[in-house]
Image (spheres, helix red, strand yellow):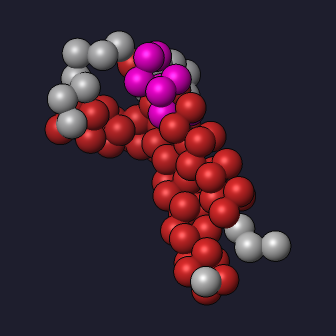
Amino acid sequence: MRVVAWILTLLLLVLGAGLAALTLGAFAALSAGAPLWLRSVGSLESAMSAGLGWADVPGFTRALVLAVLTSAVAALGAYIKPR
């Protein structure tokens, strides 16, 4: 059971890191002064959101939802971690 918990923890932390990158990109896409590579990640997030049907949701709202989702995934990964 511990092995399954470790595998799930690692998967959730990797997912959380990916979501964190998308969240940073989503916030960077809102500003014209952000670095180009970070705005490129924001355009990737925008394309993914359009594929999921979230194209009509404002960018700031999408970024906030992503931030909450990232926090929840990271917290779940920390909670499941075997002690």
Q: Is residue 35 visible?
A: no
Report which quarter residue 13 is drawn in: bottom right
Report which quarter residue 67 is drawn in: top right
Q: Residue sitting at 63 percent across and 77 percent down?
A: 6
Label count reads 0
| Residue 52 position within the rendered picture, expressed as x and y whole percent measured from the top left | 21, 36
Check if residue 66 falls in the magenta segment.
yes
Q: Is residue 36 above or below residue 80?
A: above
Furthest residue to the right?
83
Q: Is residue 46 above or below residue 55?
A: below
Instruction: Tell me if 1 is positioned left or right of 54 in this view.
Output: right
22 vs 32, nearest the viewer: 22
Q: Is residue 9 visible?
A: yes
Q: The N terminus lies in which quarter of the figure?
A: bottom right
Label the magenta part by its dominant secondary structure: helix
Q: Residue sitting at 35 percent across and 38 percent down?
A: 45
Q: Residue sitting at 52 percent across and 23 percent down?
A: 64
Instruction: Tell me if 81 is positioned left or right of 40 in this view.
Output: right
5 vs 23, nearest the viewer: 5
| Residue 73 position within the rendered picture, expressed as x and y whole percent measured from the top left | 56, 49
Q: Residue sitting at 41 percent across and 43 percent down?
A: 41
| Residue 10 position within the rendered picture, expressed as x and y whole percent measured from the top left | 59, 71
Check if residue 65 falls in the magenta segment.
yes
**Span shown in magenta:** 60-67
13 vs 22, nearest the viewer: 13
Q: Is residue 2 above or below residue 69?
A: below
Q: The C terminus lies in which quarter of the figure?
A: bottom right
